[in-house]
Image (tube, rainbow, N blue to C red):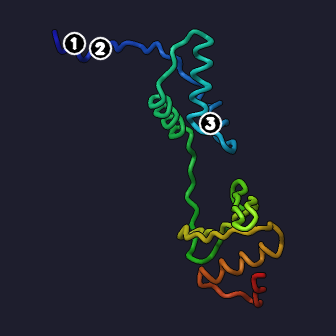
Amino acid sequence: MRVALLFPTNPVKSERHMPDYSHIDKEMRKSGVTLTVLWTEYCEACRLAGKIPFMFTQFCHYYRQYRLRQKATMHLERSPGEQVEVDWAGQTAFVRDPDTGKNLPAYLFVATLSYSQYTYVEAFYKRDLRAWINAACAAVSVFGGRSQNRCPRQS
């Protein structure tokens, strides 16, 4: 009889309001959005609607469960050294000039070997063709590759 109290056959349904995780997932794809921000917005919406929200840990747990169900994966066969993915990454970083105290923009160039995920990252003050060529040549050199033409020197 006491076991039935600990392990009921009909579990009690939670009174907490389940968030719209498809909406949360779309919001998470935006730059600068975090689960903490979305949880705060969710709590505020629950408060205004007179509903009980989940605590942050449960909110994150159910979001992870949602992502696992939505995650579609596909294995791509790659050979070592065959392919490199390159791009300017993320938001602009800033470096403080010690002489003037000004914040200078720093753009991150990222090159990743597709097979090994070995990554090369370098920051540049300009995001132009010359920086792109210099960064690509430096990445090829670091990865142990050879360029058909001589790469320009960094200036």
Secondary structure of the residue carrying tag 3 is: helix
Amino acid type of disc 3?
A: Asp
Q: In which quarter of the image is residue 32?
A: top right
Could you tell me residue 153's position as x and y percent? 76, 86
Mark 1 or 3: in front is 3
Q: Quadrant of residue 48?
A: top right
Q: Residue 9 carries which label?
A: 2
Amino acid type of disc 2?
A: Thr
Mark 2 or 3: in front is 3
Asked whether disc 1 touches disc 3, contact meaning CB atoms under 8 Å apart, the reply is no
Amino acid type of disc 1?
A: Ala
- The first of marks 1 and 3 along the sequence is 1
Q: Nearer the viewer, residue 61 or 10?
A: 61
The residue singled out by tag 1 in the image is 4
For mark 1, does the 10 Å Cα neighbourhood hold few (<14), some (14 to 19), or many (20 or more) residues?
Answer: few
For mark 2, does the 10 Å Cα neighbourhood hold few (<14), some (14 to 19), or many (20 or more) residues?
Answer: few
Could you tell me residue 141's position as x and y percent? 64, 83
- Which residue in the rendered view is the most extreme toward the left? 1
Could you tell me residue 142's position as x and y percent? 60, 81
Name which residue lies at 76% across and 60% down.
Answer: 102
Left or right: 132 as drawn, with respect to 55: right
Secondary structure of the residue carrying tag 2 is: loop
Could you tell me residue 131's position as x and y percent? 78, 73
The residue singled out by tag 3 in the image is 25
Q: Which mark is residue 143?
A: none
Q: Distance between the residues labelled 1 and 3?
A: 38 Å
